[in-house]
Amino acid sequence: MIDKNEKCYVAGHRGMVGSAVVTKLKEAGYSNIIGRSSKELDLTNQQAVEKFFQQEKPHYVILAAAKVGGIGANIKYPAEFLYQNLSIQNNVIHFAYKCGVQKLVFLGSSCIYPRECPQPMKEEYLLTGKLEPTNEGYAIAKIAGLKMLEYYHKQYGMKGFSVMPCNLYGTNDSFDPSHSHVLSALVKKFVDAVDNKESKVEIWGSGNARRELMHVNDCADAVVYLFENYEGADFINVGTGEDVSIRELAEEIAKETEFVGELVFDHSKPDGMPRKCLDVNRLSTMGFKHKISLAQGIKQTVSEYKKSKNLK
C-alpha cells in the first residue's frame, strides 16, 4: 500500500517526463515529493548519489532522469548516451536498494526492442534480435537498467518495476533541433517555416517510418497509476497502441500550422527503426487508457511552441 505522505524522490524532476510525473503526483495527493537539479546532484557521480540517499532516505523513487535526444544526437554521441545513462541508473538503483527504498519505478524506452521486431511489440520480444543501429547506445543502457532492477528484485527482493514508453512529446519537451523528439522537432520546423514565409520544409528520411506517439501527460498518468496499483516485477509497455507514418504526422502538423508549401523528404538521412508500435495489452488489462488524442496533442504543442517563441 502506497503512503502518500512518505518521501518520494523523482529523479529528473525538471525534465519532460519527470516534471509531468511530479504534477500528477501532486494532483493525486502526494505531499512529500523531492527532487534535485543536475547542478545540485550529479547522478553520474557515485559518491554524490550515495551521500544523497544516506541523507534523504526516500521511501519511494521514480527514476525519470536520463540523457535523451533525437536520432541525430543518438548517431553523433553514442558513447555519451551509453555511459551517462548507465551511470545514472546504476547509481540510483543501487543506492536506492542500499538505503531500503520501498518501491522504485524505472523509465526506459520502446527503442529497447529489435529493429526487425514483430508488430505490435510485446514485452516478451525483448532481446530476440539486433537493435536499431542509430540508437543502439541508448537502447543498451535502457535494457541494462530494466535488467538491473529485475535482478535486484530476484536476488535481493527489491520492490520495483520498469515502464517502457513509446515516443513521447508534449509540455517541457525541448524544441532544440539537436535534442528534440520527432513531433516537437517537426512542430518547430513548420511553425518557423510559416513565420519565415518559406516555401518548403525538409524532413529527415523517407517519411515511411512509423511511430507511436503519446503525450507526456498520459505517460505520467500511466506511471502514477502503475506505481499505485502494480505489484509485479516484470516491465510494462506504456503507449497508445496506435502508430502513424512520419509523412502522415508531418501532413497533420502542416495542416495545424496552416503551412501550404512543399514537404521535402531527405532520403539520404536515416529513418531509424521501420516501425515502433507497442503492444499495450498488459497495461490496458490493468484498466488504463490514454486520454489525449494525437490531434489534440499536436494542437497543444503548436500552441506551446508559439508561446515560447513570443517570450524570446
Image (cartoon, helix red, strand yellow):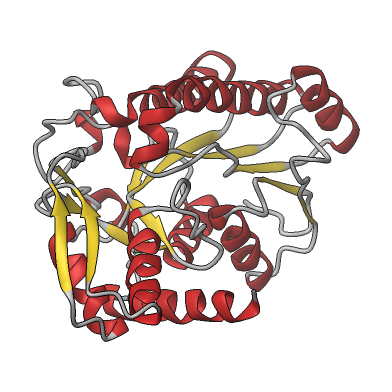
User: Residue at 54% of width from left, 35% of height from top?
Assistant: 160
User: Residue at 79% of width from left, 36% of height from top?
Assistant: 41
- What number of labels is visible? 0
Where residue 53 appears, x then y in whole percent? 81, 30
User: Residue at 58% of width from left, 27% of height from top?
Assistant: 89
Where residue 260 appears, x then y in whole percent? 19, 82
Kindly indicate the quadrant of the structure image that contains residue 115.
top left
Q: Is residue 244 visible?
A: no
Where residue 39 appears, x then y in whole percent? 80, 40
Residue lying farthest to the bottom in this orientation: 258
268 or 205, which lies in front?
A: 268
Kindly indicate the quadrant of the structure image that contains residue 298.
bottom left
On screen, 48 above or below 34? above
Residue 256 in the figure: left or right of residue 59: left
Residue lying farthest to the top in this orientation: 155
On screen, 229 above or below 64? below
Where residue 120 appears, x then y in whole percent? 13, 46
Residue 291 in the figure: left or right of residue 100: left
On screen, 12 above or below 48? below
Q: Is residue 55 visible?
A: yes
16 or 94, which lies in front?
A: 16
User: Residue at 66% of width from left, 20% of height from top?
Assistant: 94
Residue 264 in the figure: left or right of residue 195: left
296 or 148, which lies in front?
A: 296
Residue 193 in the figure: left or right of residue 92: left
Q: Quick one: quadrant of the C terminus?
A: bottom right
47 or 79, which lies in front?
A: 79
